Image: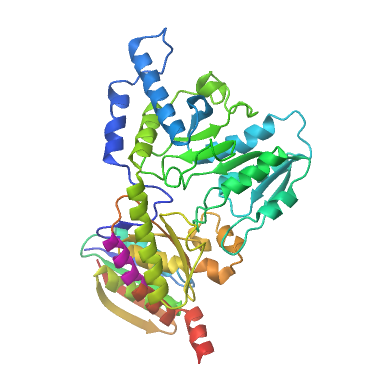
Amino acid sequence: MAEIKVDCTSETCPVPLVETRKALRKAKEGDVVEVIGTHPASKKEIPMAVKALGLELIDVQEEGGVWRIRIRR
Amino acid sequence: MLGRVVYLDNAAATRLDERVLEAVRPYFFDTYAVATSEFGYSQGIEAREALDGAREAIASALGAAPEEFIFTSGSTESSNIALKGVALALDKKKDKHIIVSKIEDFPVLHSSQALEKQGFQVTYLDVDGDGFVDLDKLRDSMTNETILVSIQHANQEIGTIQDIEGIGHICREKGVLFHTDATHTFPWVPLDVKRIPVDLVTVSAHTIHGPKGIGGLYIRQGTQIAKWVDGGFQEFNLRAGLENIAGAVGFAKAVELITPEETKRLQEMRDRLIDRILAEIPNSTLNGHRWRRLPQNANITFHFVEGESMTLHLDMRGFAVSTGSACFSRSLEGSHVIFGIGGDHERTHGSIRFTFGRYNTMEDVDAVVQALAEIVKELRSISPLGKNREKEEG
């Protein structure tokens, strides 16, 4: 199981979601995609998309304005 | 993204119909020779007959004679030939005048801009809030130097169908050539060149479940037009190059398969989608005229959300649509069509185009409306635009 990191720091909507989608397309079943970013709306819309895709949202963490979302494909 | 796709972007490209594939198959494996004259070998003659048959069938669907229809690589090339071919055929080019609408598709708009650089004058006509060209304004914008008017049959984004008969009569009265881009109407919306005074018509197979890479141009007999590609004598000595016989046969088959019943079915899906969205999703606006629009097209702005976000979320739920929003387009500019009908950046950014095809069902309509209702509500709850709206509404 691989872990794929996507750094979207300083990027605004919809780039973090585009990058997340790109990473999820490449990921294999069971791989973990970790997205890091700073745009507040993306922190909310990525979990929305994960839910719609029926994938597992492992966790969402935030520290000092930087959020980290982990998704299992 | 991960499972079944409900494809609602049929104005961009369509799934090939299996019957088209079966019709073209022999021209890859059995009758693959170049089309030859009756003095050539038999396979070449068969290829010629197939090409002639396809030409006759498509020309006939336009009410034209076969010798008035040439095959091209698609609608982009057809419109380029129409505008530049007419312009090139003139002896004196300087200060000659062309009129197009502001909401034409890029082949017409960019060909016009290219001609401007060569000294032609171009008027880009305004349209009204539904996308219609005003016939009086068209008449008023004509000068003694006007050589060509190019106004689309229907718009590629908002679906508005122009009064091409009225436009054609004005052009005929003034002795000006008239080209129309019928990429999105042919043959869903009837266009009979015997009745409508139009001199050049762009058509394509890619929007009607035919092959990509094949289109055509109707050229009324007697129209002065320059040779487009130099080489051999193909396509009545206007466009040289080996004929795409499989493409031509596929195009003709695709035209044959369109029926009034299918058009009606598309229209029913369109109407259900528009009615349900406008009734069920607040702050949504239809772009284009409610009724005088393409049977397969709906274009709606969802205010306070961005089109890119919507297309991404829809994609992740298995729906393919397009948006007029800037980042979605390769030009990175918002839709010139929505701006053209008086829309602002916000209306452009939130616009989504849904275009139906043969393989869509009413269940697809209901499924996309349900997904949209959820997505729009969620996006508005997190979008700065949506939050501003909430503040405004108190």
Residue segment shown in magenta:
B362-372
Q: Residue at x 34, y 82 (%)?
A: A61
Name the dominant secondary structure of the magenta segment.
helix
The percent coordinates of residue B96 (x first, y second) are 76, 39
Q: Is residue B9 visible?
A: yes
Residue B124 is one of the magenta-drawn residues: no
Q: Quadrant of residue B23?
A: top left
The vertical placement of B40 against B158, above or below, is above
Tell which residue pokes out farthest to the top in this image.
Answer: B39
Give the left or right position of residue B74, taking residue A56 as reference.
right
Membership of B370 in magenta stretch: yes
What x and y, as percent, mark residue A39?
46, 76
Quarter holding residue A47:
bottom left
* Image coordinates for residue B321, horizontal then vertical, percent: 40, 59
Depth check, front residue: B57 or B193: B193
Q: Is residue B88 left or right of residue A5?
A: right
Position above or below: B207 against B236: below
For the point 54% across and 66% down, the residue is B348
Describe residue B107's horizontal placement relative to residue B149 as left or right.
Answer: left
Q: Nearer the viewer, residue B202 or A30?
A: B202
Side (left or right) of B130 relative to B53 = right
